[in-house]
Amino acid sequence: MTLGPTTIGDGTVAVIAGPCAVETPEQMAATAAAVAGHGAVGLRGGVFKPRTWPYSFQGLKWDGLDLLVAARERTGLPFITEVCEPEHVKRLAEVVDGFQIGTRNMQNFALLTAVGQSGLPVVLKRGFGCTVEEALAAAEYLLQEGNDQVVLCERGIRTFEPWARFTLDVTAVALWKERTHLPVMADPSHSGGRPELVEPLALAAIAAGADALLVDVHVRPEEALCDGAQALRPAQFAGLMDRLGRAAAGLGRRLAEPAATVPPAEGECA
Ligand code: PEP
Ligand code: MN
């Protein structure tokens, strides 16, 4: 799968990072600058947020897209964002670099078909109650439309374990690597649900063969409108990237390098 200039699945470890939700111009700009500065190859940020409770922040919707576009212009990094409605696909496709299909929509077949027809890169998150095979079957809906720009994402499944938000199923990563040619991603943020779990789960995922990681980062997690409890601060993300680089080297791999050059912040000397 090719996201901007990066090929996910070429043996390197690619990291896509950013806030769970796009919230404000300042939050998005600062978080994007931080993740770009520490070696992410892509940005994440949700503008349509599928929330468990209808009273929770539902995302900035179309207004949030401009903030992702501005962050891409500033950092040079491509971005992915979640799409929840088949009717939104065409309009989003005009600006996004790639789509994310969330865990709750993995078997939304009309959505899969519409995203398949877009031909754009797509991160397909495994349904938290779905099998490894069911995720592959969902990917077939994308492939069937002629879209081969697909990455499978293990984001944790529901188990009897209450000390983590979900349980990262490392077995799924290894099974997908064994049974399909598609690149595989892991999301240690949504699975563990806590900053302390991000690094061990990320390391486990790359040891199992994951090609990419999706990591929540927020400049002020305590103020986040969505999933602040699991977001890394920029300094924690920097530490993670450093240790991931070392771990990758130990596995005979390396971190994918961002093609983008990050311009210095305003008023800062080059
Ligand atoms: C997300 O990435 O913000 C998200 C909602 O993920 P998931 O669909 O895995 O819960
Ligand atoms: Mn989230």
Image (spheres, rainbow, N blue to C red):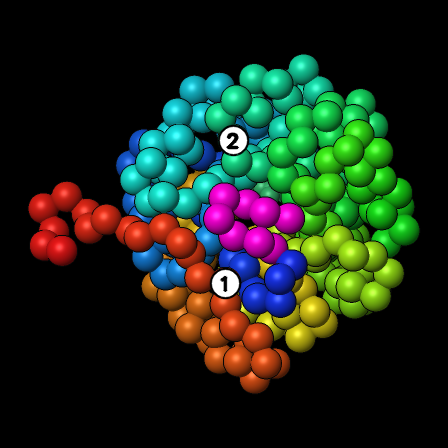
Quadrant position of ligand 1 = top right
Q: Quadrant of the C terminus?
A: bottom left
The relative height of residue 21 versus residue 244 in the rendered view (above or below) is above
Query: Is any part of residue 200 visible from this angle?
Result: no
Q: Residue furthest bottom?
A: 250
> What is the x, y in percent for residue 33?
32, 48
Magenta region includes residue 6: yes
Judged from the image, the secondary structure of the residue bearing numbered disc 1 is loop
Residue 155, position as x, y percentages in the image = 69, 53
* Rendered residue at 63%/34% (across/down): 120
The residue singled out by tag 1 in the image is 256
Amino acid type at image mark 1: Ala
Q: Which sits in the foreground, 151 or 28?
A: 151
The image shows residue 64, relative to residue 186, as above or below, that is above
Query: Is residue 104 located in the magenta-colored stretch of the structure?
Result: no
Report how many numbered discs are placed on residues in the image: 2
For the point 14% across and 43% down, the residue is 266
Amino acid type, callout 2: Val
Task: Using a 10 Å C-alpha cutoff, classify the residue at mark 1 as few (fewer than 14 neighbours), some (14 to 19) or many (20 or more).
Answer: many
Tag of residue 96: 2
Q: How much space separates mark 1 and mark 2, taking CA atoms?
A: 21 Å
Q: Of helix, strand and loop, which one carries label 2?
A: loop
